[in-house]
Each structure stands twice: as C-alpha cells, then as structure tokens.
Amino acid sequence: MRVHLVPALSARREHHGERLLERLSGLPPAITPDCTVLVLGSFPSAASLAAKQYYAHPQNRFWPILGACLGLNLSGMPYRARLNAVYAAGIGIWDVYASCERAGSLDSAIRQPAFNDFAQLQRKAPGLRRACFNGRTAARAARHLEALGFAIIELPSTSPANASQSFDFKLTQWRNALGAP
C-alpha cells in the first residue's frame, strides 16, 4: 500500500480530542520588493493549501473585494495574472502564521500557531509600510508588525464564515484602507 502525503502537511501528528491533527505549513509570501501594502490573512484554508493559491475557496470574497478596490475583475483572471495585478498596485499577500495544527479551515480550529518571519519579509520588501489584516484572527499579529514600524489596519474578514457583514460593508472598509476610489 502506498501512502501519499499532501505537500502542505508534515509527518508530525498529535491527538486533539478525537481528531488526529497534522502540522500544516502555509504558503510562501506573494510579494515583490516594490510592495508597500501587505494584506495578511491568518492561515490558508484547506482549499488554498491544496491549490497552492491564496484565497482559493470560491466562496471567499477576497478576490471580488480586492478586484473592486482596484477596478479589476480579479476573479475572472488566472491566478498568476491576479498576482501580477496585485503586485502592480503595490500590494503583497501573506499570512500571519507560518504553520499550525488545524482540522478543517476555520480560524477557531487553529492550534499551536507559529508566526511568519515579518522582519525577514521586510528586508525582502523594504518599501512595506502598511499591514492590512483580513479579519480578527490575523490582527492578533498587530503588535509584531507595529514593532517593525508598520501602520496597522484591521479589516472585516472576507471569509465565508463572516456572513454577518454585507459585501458592501466589507468593500467600503477595504476601499478606505487601500485608498481605492
């Protein structure tokens, strides 16, 4: 019998209640040296890890909201074209956690998180000045980024789990934070 490991999963397993949790590793930063704004989620969803793409779950409103902020149909573009459009706007994408243990995709299920190395990222993209957190869980890293001199903005989560806020409300908050028309 062959065993296939998903690349985002490590071999370490721990028992959590009745579930067996594996240590998950996040995605590399989607950034260029010229980026001035960093949008940070908490940790990629299971769909994003499987696709190796940020915000890959079709119900996540990230791409439609960011696209509306930039005046582009990002959702209708191939992933690489999306990233290039975001880079052209001076925006980078990453997550606050480099790794964690989690069953499913909910932030509330994250256990034993380890932060990403923001100081190293700042050396790679020295123009970064602002960190926009996609939701409350991501905003838990605010003090780490403030210590590096980032301006901090907490935004409403684009996750389908955040259904209590309308698309229009989220869009207004995101436009204000990104300085979009």
Image: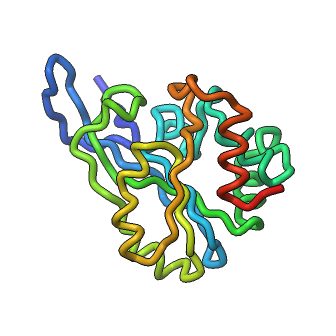
Residue 94 position (above or below residue 63)? below
Q: Position of residue 137 (x, y in %)?
A: 39, 43
**Left or right: 1 in relation to 34:** left
**In the visual, does 90 lie left or right of 101?**
right
Identify whether 101 is placed above or below 2: below
Number of numbered callouts drawn = 0
Q: Residue at coordinates 78% horizontally, 57% vertically from top-left?
A: 180
Residue sitting at x 33%, y 43% = 24
**Percent from the top left, x then y, of residue 131?**
53, 63
Looking at the image, residue 113 sits to the left or right of residue 88; the answer is left
Rendering coords of residue 181 (x, y %): 84, 55
Most foreground residue, 10 or 92: 92
Viewer-side residue, 18 vs 9 = 18
Q: Residue at x 71, y 65 (%)?
A: 87
Q: Dividing the image into 4 quarters, which one contains the N terminus?
A: top left
Q: Residue at x 41, y 49 (%)?
A: 26
> Which quadrant would residue 64 be assigned to in this image?
top right
Residue 38 pos. (x, y %): 56, 63
* Coloration of the structure image: rainbow
Answer left or right for 146 relative to 115.
Answer: right
